[in-house]
Amino acid sequence: MKTFITWFVACSSLILSVVFQVQANTELSASNSSLNGWCASLRKQQSCLNLHLQLAENGRADSAYWVAKANARGTFEDADFTKAADYYQFASNQQHPDASRELGLLHYHGVIGQRDFVKAQGLFEQAVAQGNAEGIWALARMYHYGRGVEQSYQKAFELFTLAAELGSKPAASTLAYYYKVGLATEVNPRLASYWGNKARVKRLVTWNRSIPDYR
């Protein structure tokens, strides 16, 4: 009888393990929109965290990025930027553009140590190579302020333009200023108004403000 009980428990554990792994693999292959939709309900947030932690362990970059954001924002406990950086790094190593941008911001602002413009630039450029609008905007700011690079309004203007065309609201706002005052371009009230209006359109990309925006 004892042998049967031991066998039954072992089989049950194995079955549960297989079921959970199948679920994880299914979620891994599911679209981000489906997973995000499942997580939309507040009462499922803790379950969502557990699932993303499991999927991140299985190598899913989007889940590692999700967990990183939760740590940075203090969604479930006090914000932990060091832990967030680890998950951002994991996702960035898999060429996740949003993770590269956010990790770059941590280095740029010195949130996880001394400000490191070299690392920030490299991560922003990695995001830029993948067409990430906010990564382009972040790199443009480096040229605008001359942070870690030779200051160049012309280079910044080109990058702000590209980011704004890809839907970055902060870039659109800054580009409107460039056209308003004639910075690296001719004064153009029409384009200043155009990009100013774009910056106020809700459907455009919005900036993640979980990190203080200081220079």
Image (cartoon, rainbow, N blue to C red):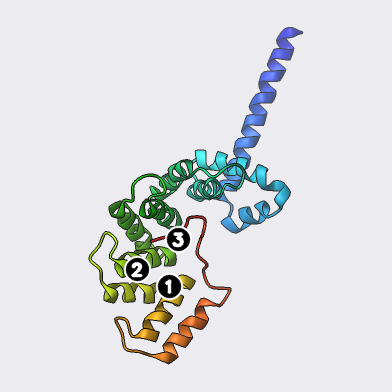
Q: Residue furthest left?
A: 150
Q: Is residue 209 visible?
A: yes
Alpha-carbon span between mark 2 and mark 3: 15 Å
Circle 3 sits on which residue?
Answer: 213
Residue 95 is marked as none
Alpha-carbon span between mark 1 and mark 3: 14 Å
Write the residue at 64% across / 26% down: 14
* Apparent side of residue 84 relative to residue 14 in the rendered image (left or right): left
Q: Nearer the viewer, residue 120 or 163?
A: 120
State which tag comes first along the sequence, 2 or 1.
2
The reply to whether the C-beta atoms of the residues labelled 2 and 1 are less than 8 Å apart is yes
Single out the mark in the foreground, 1 or 3.
3
Tell me if mark 2 has few (under 14), some (14-19) or many (20+) residues whose alpha carbon lies within 10 angstroms of its own. many
**In the rendering, at what x and y percent does residue 120 appear?**
33, 55
**Residue 213 vertical position relative to residue 177 in the rendered view, above or below:** above
Write the residue at 33% across / 85% down: 182
**In the rendering, at what x and y percent does residue 173 appear?**
46, 76
Instruction: Report the amino acid beneath label 1.
Output: Ala
Circle 1 sits on which residue?
Answer: 171
Instruction: Report the amino acid beneath label 2.
Output: Ala
Circle 2 sits on which residue?
Answer: 140
**Residue 45 vertical position relative to residue 130 in the rendered view, above or below:** above
State which tag comes first along the sequence, 2 or 3.
2
